Amino acid sequence: MKLNERGLLVVISGPSGVGKGTVRRALFQMKNHDLVYYVSMTTRPKRPGEVDGEDYYFVSRETFEKRIKDNKFLEWAEFVGNYYGTPRDKVDEQLDRGKEVVLEIEVDGALQVREQMKDAVFIFIVPPGKEALYNRLKKRGTEDIEIVNQRMKKAESEFMLAHKYDYIVVNDEVTNAADRIMAIIRAEHAKTERTIHNYMKMIGE
Amino acid sequence: MKLNERGLLVVISGPSGVGKGTVRRALFQMKNHDLVYYVSMTTRPKRPGEVDGEDYYFVSRETFEKRIKDNKFLEWAEFVGNYYGTPRDKVDEQLDRGKEVVLEIEVDGALQVREQMKDAVFIFIVPPGKEALYNRLKKRGTEDIEIVNQRMKKAESEFMLAHKYDYIVVNDEVTNAADRIMAIIRAEHAKTERTIHNYMKMIGE
């Protein structure tokens, strides 16, 4: 029996190159979950085969900018001339349905969300050490050591933001990290501040 | 990889009759855990077959009272002329070894521990409703409705103390409740305040 019926907003973030996407995919492959992946809104043109509301919500620049002004994004950014953002109303809809909405985003975006969603759960995925991250970045295709060094420098500044998160999960082994995130979600649902209201109703007070 | 190496003190409590003992036993039957059950200290005489340090630590009244004065108990109480208490040093030893120490205690004792161990995890086990608890108390052997009503009254005053705990877990189904407690323990180990110190060491800061 779950005393908290509303879904959780689960923000998975961490330094560049740590493997956030891999952990998130492992999480969705687990059994018996109510996780949904968030859908971003963007102004970039729809590509062949993409479906509105599945790959992205595709909107005009005008619509996007109006939504920014109306504070309708949990976070947004401009990237190579296009806007990308997480629409707050779409996230709320899912949470109301009892779904856990998983946001896998960069550190900048996560800190924007933190300011707006006080009851979201913020998880910082970290590598088992700096060297491990460096090796992972090197393996990622590009041979250009300059680019690897740039990314590493960015990651190092992001390393220092761990204290802004609720949980720190080491991505030493992907299924291990996913397991721990699932435990965090289960535990968060039992937290007193999320359950006390329905608890008082249940005991008839 | 576990960033927090110290064990957790896990306090399982809840209104009389809720089935704390059953949930605790189910918890210890789970696989791959580092849980240890705490051993109380008492002044009551050792019974045949009881082992010092396993069933209880058996001490004299004098020793017990000296320990109370020296603040060496996480909680203690006098019951039918004998003292019972949880020795702080024995608990600390286990935590230092990375063991999770599980305390299954009444609400009064739990609130004593809360004052002394700020980083312990406090879990309030609740029945799925007042009626469920009433029926459970009635089933507990005694036919004396007066005693059932007295216990129910005690439970009802304890119901109101849920907000003093970190988590509320419904004991609708024992393995379900035990699962959730295990998730809470895993999640608590990943909490930023418990991991940040070793994390900073790991990344070499």
Image (cartoon, coloured by chain):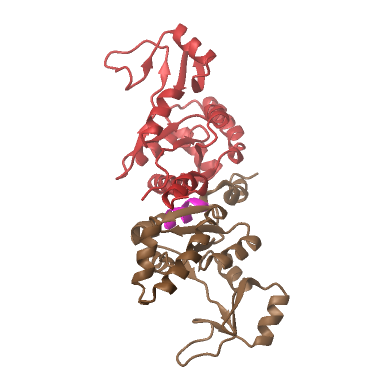
Chain colours: A brown, B red
Residue nearest the observer in this picture, B71 or A144: A144
* Picture mark count: 0
State the residue in front, B147 or A77. A77
Whether residue A95 is situated above or below residue B110 in the rendered picture: below
Query: Which span is picked out in magenta?
Result: A181-189
Q: Residue furthest left?
A: B49
Q: In the figure, B176 relative to A36: above or below?
A: above
Does residue A171 appear in the picture of this structure? no
Residue A93 makes an appearance in the image? yes
Q: Nearer the viewer, residue A190 or B148?
A: A190
Where residue A96 appears, x then y in whole percent?
Answer: 59, 66
- Residue at the limit of the structure toward the bottom, as seen here: A48
- Which x, y percent locates residue A20? 43, 66
**Left or right placement of residue B74 versus residue B26 in this view:** right
Tell me if residue A117 comes above or below residue B60 in the rendering: below
Q: In x, y percent, where is residue A187?
A: 48, 50
The picture quadrant where one finds residue A145 is: bottom left
Q: Residue at the location (42% across, 8% down)? A: B60
Question: What residue appears at the point 47 percent right and 35 percent down from the top-left corner?
Answer: B11
Q: Of all residues shown, which one is farthest toward the top?
A: B62
Provide the major secondary structure of the magenta segment: helix
Magenta-colored stretch includes residue A185: yes
Q: Residue at x 41, y 22 (%)?
A: B40
Q: Residue at x 49, y 60 (%)?
A: A156
Would residue A183 be found to the left or right of residue B14 on screen? left
Relative to A99, residue B137 above or below: above
Q: Position of residue B131 (x, y in %)?
A: 53, 42
Q: Is residue B134 magenta?
A: no
